[in-house]
């Protein structure tokens, strides 16, 4: 397990914050650019008389409505495209690794403990993959140790069958007892 974190976090909390920050900055950038465009597109020199200024204001009213509508639609389009792209990139950091973890878990459940799952450090669930690799490694070590002890017990039993005397039986029982003790010690690493 990852000892650096107190609580189990599948997805790092900063992942959500970075996603929200990027979406917010796209919206703010879109609003600022829309405001700048609107300002410069409606900028007019003042007239020399009140009647000219009134005419400019009347023309600006119609221009303002039309340009605002076009600008709103264009800004909305770019904001939706930007947020969609960011969402796809961020979901790629979750969905792809989840798929790889699913394939890995299938292999482990079928008994294949030889592989490890490999994720990029920037993937959202990298700590979970690291913990799973540690778990499978520990289980593999326990199984290897138990197999070694079982082979020893089998060898001791075969040797005892070749020597049917009573002194050999006592020695055999002691050796098997030590091996069983070792097996129990190995199994104590796993809590059920």
Image (spheres, rainbow, N blue to C red):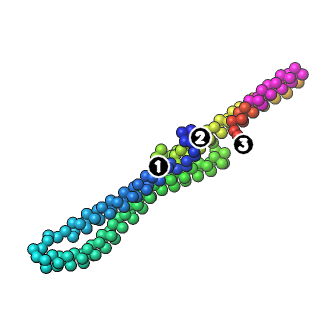
Q: Nearer the viewer, residue 146 or 7?
A: 7
**Is the C-beta separation of discs 3 and 1 under 8 Å?**
no
Categorize mark 3 by other alpha carbons within 10 Å: few (<14), some (14-19), many (20+): few
Q: Image quadrant for the N terminus?
A: top right
Residue corresponding to mark 3: 192
Left or right: where 7 falls relative to 73: right
Tell me which residue sits at (58%, 52%) in the image: 102
Left or right: where 110 falls relative to 51: right
Helix, strand, or loop for circle 3? loop
**Is the C-beta separation of discs 1 and 2 under 8 Å?**
no
Bounds of the magenta segment: 165-183
Residue corresponding to mark 1: 14
1 or 2: tag closer to the N-terminus: 2
Image coordinates for residue 30, horizontal then vertical, percent: 33, 62
Helix, strand, or loop for circle 1? helix
2 or 3: tag closer to the N-terminus: 2
Categorize mark 2 by other alpha carbons within 10 Å: few (<14), some (14-19), many (20+): few
Left or right: where 65 falls relative to 156: left
Tell me which residue sits at (21%, 66%) in the image: 40
Q: Nearer the viewer, residue 14 or 168?
A: 14
Q: Which image quadrant is residue 178 in?
A: top right
Residue corresponding to mark 2: 1
Helix, strand, or loop for circle 2? loop
């Amino acid at each position: 397990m990852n000892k650096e974190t107190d609580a189990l976090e599948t997805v790092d909390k900063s992942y959500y914050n970075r996603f929200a920050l990027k979406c917010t900055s796209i919206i703010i950038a879109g609003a600022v650019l829309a405001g700048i465009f609107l300002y410069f597109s409606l900028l007019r020199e003042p007239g020399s008389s009140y009647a000219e200024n009134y005419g400019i204001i009347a023309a600006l009213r119609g221009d303002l409505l039309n340009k605002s509508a076009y600008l709103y639609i264009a800004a909305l389009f770019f904001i939706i495209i930007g947020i969609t792209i960011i969402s796809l990139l961020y979901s790629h950091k979750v969905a792809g690794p989840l798929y790889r973890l699913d394939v890995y878990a299938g292999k482990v459940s079928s008994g294949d403990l030889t592989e490890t799952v490999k994720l990029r450090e920037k993937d959202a669930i990298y700590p979970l993959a690291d913990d799973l690799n540690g778990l499978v490694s520990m289980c593999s070590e326990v199984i290897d140790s138990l197999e070694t002890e079982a082979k020893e017990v089998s060898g001791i039993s075969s040797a005892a069958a070749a020597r049917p005397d009573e002194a050999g039986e006592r020695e055999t029982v002691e050796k098997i007892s030590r091996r069983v003790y070792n097996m129990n010690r190995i199994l104590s690493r796993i809590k059920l």
